[in-house]
Amino acid sequence: MKKTIYGIMGGLLTAALVSSCGEDRSGEYYALITTQTWMYETMQKEYLYYQDMPNKKSLDFFKKPSDFLNSAVSSKDKKSGATFSHIDSVYVSARSTSQTPTFGFEGTMVRANNGSYGIRVLYTQENSPAYEAGLKRGDIIIAANSKKINSSDLFYITSPKEAYLFTMGKLNENGFDTLQTVQMPSPRIVENNNLYKSQVTDFGGKKVAYIMYNEFGNNDTEKLKELFNSLAVQPVDDIILDLRYNPGGYVTTAQMISTNLAPQEAIGNTFLKMTHNDIINRTDVLNFEQSLLANASALSYNNLYIITSGNTASASEVVINCLKPYMSGRLFQVGTATFGKNVAQQLFTDEEQAPMLEFWLTNSLLSNAEDFSDYYTSGLKPDYEIAENLKGELGELGTEQDSLMLPILKHIETGSFPTKDETEETPETASRSIEEKHYFNSSIDLKPKSAILE
């Protein structure tokens, strides 16, 4: 009955706009749905899953663009609560920046045995309110302004609108012990350093480069060039690329990083295939390009270790999947299975029909030189499985105190990973569920983005 009523009301609204007091007002009607009509027509031509789209008559074109898109996308364009096609920005007024005020730390939810919640600090950005207040990796926030943290507070705490007085805590067998309070400065726009940490350290008599990269940004080229240039002048034996918190980003940045990590024989060959729908009937091929090498020649090193988790997605998965055909026996994935996002989005804009709107549409399937792309369901599985114990001592990233580093250091020293008997595996170190993968605040559904703009 409700559907019938809504249909009648919709028809009455249309009739009123087309003929009010004998005046043709159809222009006003079409103006209300111009953006949504353009989106639908674009999807019919460019959308990877255009065949799954609902019939035009079944869609409500009066919904706002983001809601309209959610009603039109295929179930294949979603996973674990994330929708890959998205409206990145709808401008209602001119904006000076795409960033929003923040405290400048990444966190994840942890749940105590008594059912209470806390937010575990994974890392903080320099020159941020969190850094100035002394928050550090491993700290646990159990209350904000004297209100206990609940399971839905992660976004509001990491993307705040006001200053907070944090109550810090420590896990015990039954819940949290209360420690000190920390007054957070007001949130502000913080420049995120995607290349969070890089260092060369001696481990077991070998020089090992550790690189923690937390998002494939579109403006990271110069920093990455400096990194790879420095590795070229101080030769290393092995490289560890830490992508455990990296939800993805731009395909072109993944191409640049992968090219600099690839062996010399890969240069000039296929890096990534981006296959469009059968209407477009085209596969775009990106290569490991000589011009992308920071030092004009490939790095000389032995093994590449890539640290992953269920939050490792999109462009991060592209790096792993596309280097594998060229690094057999030299690329080792350590951690838990990745998220499993094997598609890319392309930006579509139209200032006349959709002014001030950025429409990122899933338009290609991502595969490597061997045409492998089948990791949507289970992600890319590790060679050595170990999960970060978010309830235990996290340890400084990239050191022997970091639990995810231990099997890698064992392999670097001996050539083999520890046996299960050599590792103390607790329920918290086992693979996490799909729901827990989204306890991080990073937004998987916005990545990766194709840098081919139209």
Image (tube, grey):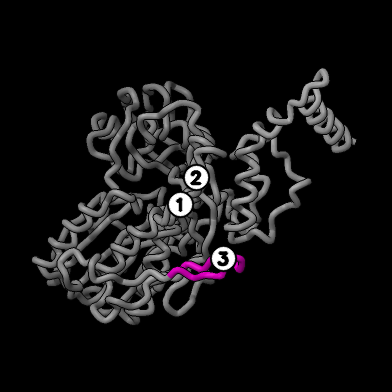
What residue would you read off at disc 1? 454
The quadrant where residue 181 appears: top left
Which secondary structure type mostly characterizes the magenta part of the structure?
Answer: loop
Q: Earlier in the sequence, mark 2 or mark 1?
A: 2
Amino acid of disc 3: Ile
Q: Is residue 206 visible?
A: yes
Mark 1, Cα crowd under 10 Å, few <14 / some 14-19 / many 20+, is few
Q: Secondary structure at mark 3?
A: loop
Report the side of 174 relative to 37 (left or right). Answer: left
Residue found farthest to the front: 23
Q: CA distance from mark 3 to mark 2?
A: 19 Å
Is the C-beta separation of discs 3 and 2 under 8 Å? no
Which label belongs to residue 349? 2
* Residue 263 x, y percent position in the rendering: 25, 77
Amino acid of disc 1: Glu
* 145 vs 373, nearest the viewer: 373
* 190 vs 23, nearest the viewer: 23
377 vs 31: above or below: below
What residue would you read off at disc 3? 280
* Residue 179 x, y percent position in the rendering: 34, 30
Is the C-beta separation of discs 2 and 1 under 8 Å? yes
Q: Earlier in the sequence, mark 3 or mark 1?
A: 3
Q: Is residue 112 visible?
A: no
Q: CA distance from mark 2 to mark 1?
A: 7 Å
* Residue 108 x, y percent position in the rendering: 43, 44
Which label belongs to residue 136? none
Q: Secondary structure at mark 2?
A: strand
Q: Earlier in the sequence, mark 3 or mark 2?
A: 3
* 432 vs 365, nearest the viewer: 365
Please name the residue shown 82% across and 18% down the image.
21
Magenta region, residue range: 274-284
Please name the residue shown 28% across and 70% down the image.
289
